[in-house]
Image (spheres, rainbow, N blue to C red):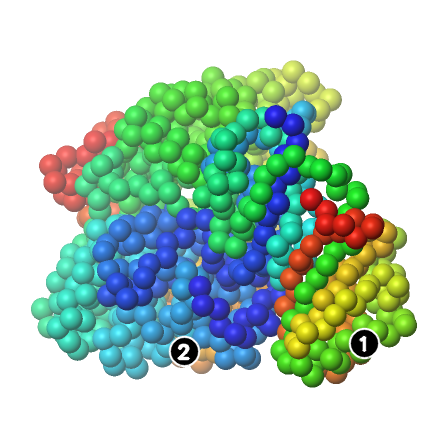
Amino acid sequence: MRMHPSLEAILPKVQKPARYTGGEFGEIIKSKEETEVRFALCFPDTYEIGMSNLGLRILYGVLNKLPGVWCERVFEPWRDMAEAMRAAKVPLYALESGDPIRDFDLIGFSVGYEMSFTGILDMLSLAGIPLRSEDRKDLQPIVFAGGACMFNPEPIADFIDLAAIGEGEELDAELTELYRRAKREGWTKGEFLSAAAQIEGVYVPSLYDVTYQPDGRIASVTPKEGAPAYVRKRILQDLDRADFPVRTIIPSTEIVHDRTMLELFRGCIRGCRFCQAGYIYRPVRAKRAETLIRQGIESLRCSGYEEISLTSLSTSDYKELGALCDGLLDWCEPRSVSLSLPSLRADNFSLELMQRVQKVRRSGLTFAPEAGTQRLRDVINKNVTEEDLLNACRTAFSGGWSSVKLYFMLGLPTETDEDVLGIADLAYKVWQVWREATPNRSRGVRITVSTSCFIPKPMTPFQWFPQDSREELIRKQKLLKDSMRSKAISYSWHEPDVSYIEAALAVGDRRLGKVLERLFASSGGLQAWEEYFDYAAWLQAFREAGLDPDFYVRRLRGEEELLPWDVIDDGVQKTHLLREKHLSERGVVSPDCRKQCLGCGANRLLEGGKCDA
Amino acid sequence: MPEVRFRFEKRLRAAYLSHLDVMRTFQRAFIRAGIRIRHSEGFNPHPKMSIALPLQLGCESVCEVLDASVLDGPEDMAGALNAALPEGIRVLAAGQPLRPVREIAWTEWSLRFPDDETASEAETVFRLPSLPVEKKTKRGLGTLDIAPHIELLAREGTELRMLLRADSPTVNAGDLRKALGGKLEKELPVRCLRLRLLTENRETFQ
Ligand code: SF4
């Protein structure tokens, strides 16, 4: 890396400077002479968060496999560093080369959390790149975004030249190749974008005219220049054969998930009605246990990590989980490498498995019943019963566990106080079960209840529903807090202020560009961080943009209404979402994909047209 | 295999790795290099290894010392490790420790200043009979006069060569920075490079 001369004076003075130097084991350095396309893979949050993202590591590996393409990493600096960089006029640089990213060809953001939208503006501004797409006239650089948030790209439509919808492994490579051609042949930016819009999975916001009704709802969306009416997401057909980088960058400094991550499958068979991930990653595609064991061991060997975590939406739904854990543990146990299994479900919890895993290291248990009563769990289609949960806890407690975390959501559609109190009841029953089942009462127990606030997310059956008002959410939190009946039960909750803004950004339209711009001007990036989240400034930014966040957050959207993200097609038909919404209103559950296919439409994304749930 | 002493350098970008970062990095590099380290007993076993005189963030060094209890490993441990370490950290030698770490009494430093003038100003400061700096001690914040514990060896252009007391009390590059900051008006970009570890009678410690 060629360090900017001013960095030497800055780095010793900022917190955790190792985040800004690159040079880690496994980073990829290429020769600039042989590089035709320079790709800045950007993550609009800190190094510690970004380096913990498996998707980012996969894309880094895939893109750097392309000859003549050099993909480098860029993260959002913490405030102290950003201020020092601005003061010393050090433009945002890529960690591998130290070169300013404003000279790069492609600038791709991976966006998984709406609250990090302002991070995109922060990074562009630090780089010295005009924020708005329309103010960037040239082919270089092209700014785009991918990730879960791009299933509604509209709120950042003003800033990006295009959005890559769905899984990026093939799509980003195709975009890069198209760019290479455009660069060789001297295309204009407009020519490149029109051509890019023809690639499946590419959405070019400027090629769609949006008009509004007087009340603020969308009146029409009209594609131009041959852009498709619907942009269908991309998926990998065969995950088992897909390239998986076992050699990745090993950060020298501590990050959030500092371990080997192994992705068992994409998608989820469950269909919880509030859960965006459960819909946008459909259909389920699993890797074979044999492949995973090989990749897991290889990754551990190449990394030196002493922990491996099985990451997927619902790990215990993996069909070959037993064989996989056996295979991994055979290698891990003699080497004192621990295996962690997050996201277990209470209805297929296996003590035997947990005990094998626990031999290496005992971890806490986490369950997510999401709602306090069976009625409400049926509404959200969380097919877990009280009995399932208590049985799972009983097994765990009698096996010696003494701490359990329970996750719930407040403000779910149709929720009443009875449902809220049901959370306290359930926690109390868990405590009673512990008293009955534990072999050692004197050790005590820790039961942690956490609630988040319901946020309507695009592409889910609950996308039409409003969020509870802030006052109502605070009232419910207090109600719940006051009804906890044991000292062993602790309760923590998410701030409704953040959830309110997050909801507006999740279901917003492209008029929110003005809000983001104003908010960034007044309060800067890092809005996903408590330290810098500025609620009053957000409200002010909405006011100045002439918009009311309640219009997005607190309104029941009509079923016929044109939604901002309707142009994006994740494979699941809207009719399916409506059907699920109606079932939820009647409190009727739906079976999971493994029990019975509900014909959501996602199977059409597969070459054979058949899901293997 | 008994204790093995790894002498390594920490340069360039690696200067910004904290002591804990370097420990973590070696822990993983050992595994990648196929070197097994003995672990402590108990509920939370950790590898038996230690680094003498942790460097301060931002300082470079060509004389770092890491002692580890090696169970087994390849013939060429230094070579295997170097293939497994990040940029800037390089093992210079792996071998039997000749003396215990507690015999390190002095550290030799090279300080580089932006120009001759500042270097000469710094030289004057370091020759003062008394140089009190604030220092964190076990009993909280205290003041230490570092003047008796530092020795100016030479100035060559923009570079100062100095000896700092390594033990009781420990004086480090940060203390020198603080001392300068208290005397000179301007803020100094000083490049600090640790060159050598020495024993009480000024022999090179290996
Ligand atoms: S098509 Fe059927 S099996 Fe496939 S994801 Fe949709 S509901 Fe599930």
Quadrant housing residue A491: top right
Three-letter code for the amino acid on which mark 2 is drawn: Gly
Answer left or right for A287 relative to A335: left
x and y, in percent, of residue A317 in the image: 35, 29
> Which of the pair B15/A362 is nearer the observer?
B15
On residue B125, the disc is: 1
Residue depicted at x 33% and y 59%: A30
On residue A577, the disc is: none
Circle nearer the viewer, 2 or 1:
1
Q: Chain of mark 2?
A: A
Quadrant housing residue A191: bottom left
Answer left or right for A583 relative to A341: left
Q: Tell me if residue A401 comes above or below residue A258 in the rendering.
A: above
Ligand 1 is within 8 Å of the C-beta of the residue at disc 1: no
Q: SS at mark 2? A: loop
Residue depicted at x 58% and y 54%: B10
Three-letter code for the amino acid on which mark 1 is drawn: Val
Q: SS at mark 1? A: helix
Identify the residue under disc 2. A128
Mark 2–mark 1 Cα distance, whole angstroms, equals 41 Å
